[in-house]
């Protein structure tokens, strides 16, 4: 990394957790990610979800076709696990380089999870095969039982699902996605090298007050929901620690303004437009700008067993205002940090 007070140059980063959607909105949001990242792990929670190899191939084709001329982004596709997932299909997709990983959504945990897994034991044969072939399992880590408080759902998931799972399948390669709690950090720190976690910009910047103080603010709502301040501080420490078990995954999740500002607003924060700038602010505040490159560009590829990207990107110190709304090819979407001033800008 080259670092002067006015700019930082790092190896080109990747986004290890991204929602691109489909159709016109996808075309509108793609350039924001491609501007910063070389590769992105693309979430499969479309409607219908990406379950089979043919679905992933077709979706990947649509993504590549939607990239503007001269703009590059390598989409890394994921399979959506259901109670009926087929181990042979997943393994074939992984062997052919179509599926990079498979995603576990507990049924009804979040947006687009209606077809998710109702009981993890139902997919044990699939998970055993994934362990055997080294295919990463990406986990949305929240229980869905109605008696569990929404702010406790991640911590309870660790005890009820993750610990038993890793005790049964100790070699499973697992990414605990978008972690939001000190309990998740402790879990990852205490697990083996086969367990890692992604951390979003929003969970490093905001706690639950951002959602609820002074009025209800739907654009700060995502799942897992932001928790109290001590959790945000634990996440900042983990992300900036230099540990190779933590890496960048934005979970950028665009929803139209009308779907967010509603009596039942959708979960998801659209952070793609200024994701790197947002992470850079955190690393600077923590006095850890020298560790941004590891988090953004090195830990992820090493965990996934993929080459580091050639090339670099440069962030310059330059104040810029984040717009209130972004037009994603005809759909207005409020970006993360709307109306704020960010201090770093991608050159
Ligand atoms: O806030 C979220 N939005 N969390 C998820 O897990 C899904 C995502 C989406 O697809 O909108
Ligand atoms: Zn997500």
Image: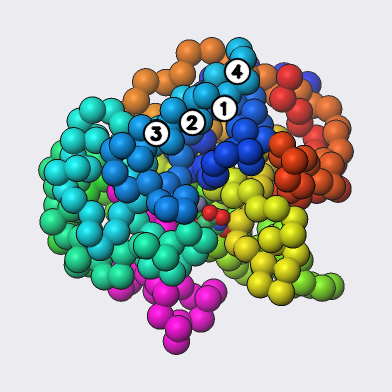
> Which residue bears the numbered disc 3?
58
The residue indicated by pointer 2 is 62
Give yes or no for contact between labels 2 and 4 (Cβ–Cβ under 8 Å): no
Kindly identify the residue that appears in the image at 57 percent across and 39 percent down: 23
Q: Estimate the spatial distance between the alpha carbons at disc 3 and disc 2, rounded to whole Å.
A: 6 Å
Q: Is residue 69 above or below residue 208?
A: above
Verify CB contact (< 8 Å) between mark 3 and mark 2: yes
Q: Earlier in the sequence, mark 4 or mark 3?
A: 3
Q: Which mark is residue 66?
A: 1
Quarter of the rendering occupied by the C terminus: top right
Report the Cα–Cα distance between label 2 and label 1. Answer: 6 Å
Q: Position of residue 330 (x, y in %)?
A: 75, 41
Per the image, is 77 magenta?
no
Name the secondary structure under disc 4. loop
Q: Which residues are magenta?
A: 136-161
Residue bearing mark 4: 71
Horizontal relation, residue 265 to residue 65: left or right: right
């Amino acid at each position: 990394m080259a670092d002067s007070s006015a700019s930082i140059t790092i190896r080109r980063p990747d986004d290890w957790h991204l929602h691109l959607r489909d159709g016109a909105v996808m075309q509108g949001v793609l350039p924001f990610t491609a501007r910063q990242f070389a590769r992105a792990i693309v979430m499969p929670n479309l409607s219908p979800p990406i379950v089979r190899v043919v679905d992933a191939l077709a979706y990947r084709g649509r993504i590549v076709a939607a990239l503007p001329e001269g703009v590059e982004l390598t989409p890394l596709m994921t399979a959506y696990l259901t109670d009926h997932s087929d181990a042979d299909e997943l393994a074939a997709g992984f062997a052919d380089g179509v599926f990079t990983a498979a995603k576990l959504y507990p049924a009804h945990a979040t947006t687009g999870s209606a077809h998710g897994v109702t009981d993890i034991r139902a997919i044990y044969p699939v998970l055993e095969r994934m362990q055997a072939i080294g295919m990463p399992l990406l986990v949305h880590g929240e229980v869905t039982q109605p008696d569990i408080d929404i702010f406790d759902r991640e911590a309870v998931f660790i005890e009820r699902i993750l610990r038993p799972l890793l005790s049964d399948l100790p070699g499973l390669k697992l990414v605990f996605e978008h972690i939001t709690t000190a309990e998740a950090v402790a879990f990852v720190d205490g697990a083996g090298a086969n367990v890692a976690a992604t951390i979003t910009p929003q969970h490093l910047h905001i706690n639950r007050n951002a959602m609820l103080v002074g009025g209800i603010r739907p654009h700060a709502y995502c799942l897992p929901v932001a928790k109290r301040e001590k959790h945000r501080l634990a996440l900042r420490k983990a992300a900036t620690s230099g540990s190779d078990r933590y890496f960048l995954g934005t979970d950028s999740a665009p929803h139209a303004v009308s779907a967010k500002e509603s009596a039942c607003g959708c979960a998801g924060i659209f952070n793609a437009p200024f994701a790197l700038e947002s992470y850079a602010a955190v690393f600077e505040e923590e006095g850890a700008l020298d560790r941004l490159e590891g988090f953004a560009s090195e830990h992820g590829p090493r965990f996934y067993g993929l080459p580091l990207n050639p090339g670099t990107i440069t962030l310059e110190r330059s104040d810029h205002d984040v717009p209130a709304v972004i037009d994603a090819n005809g759909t207005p979407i409020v970006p993360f940090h709307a109306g704020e001033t960010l201090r770093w800008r991608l050159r």
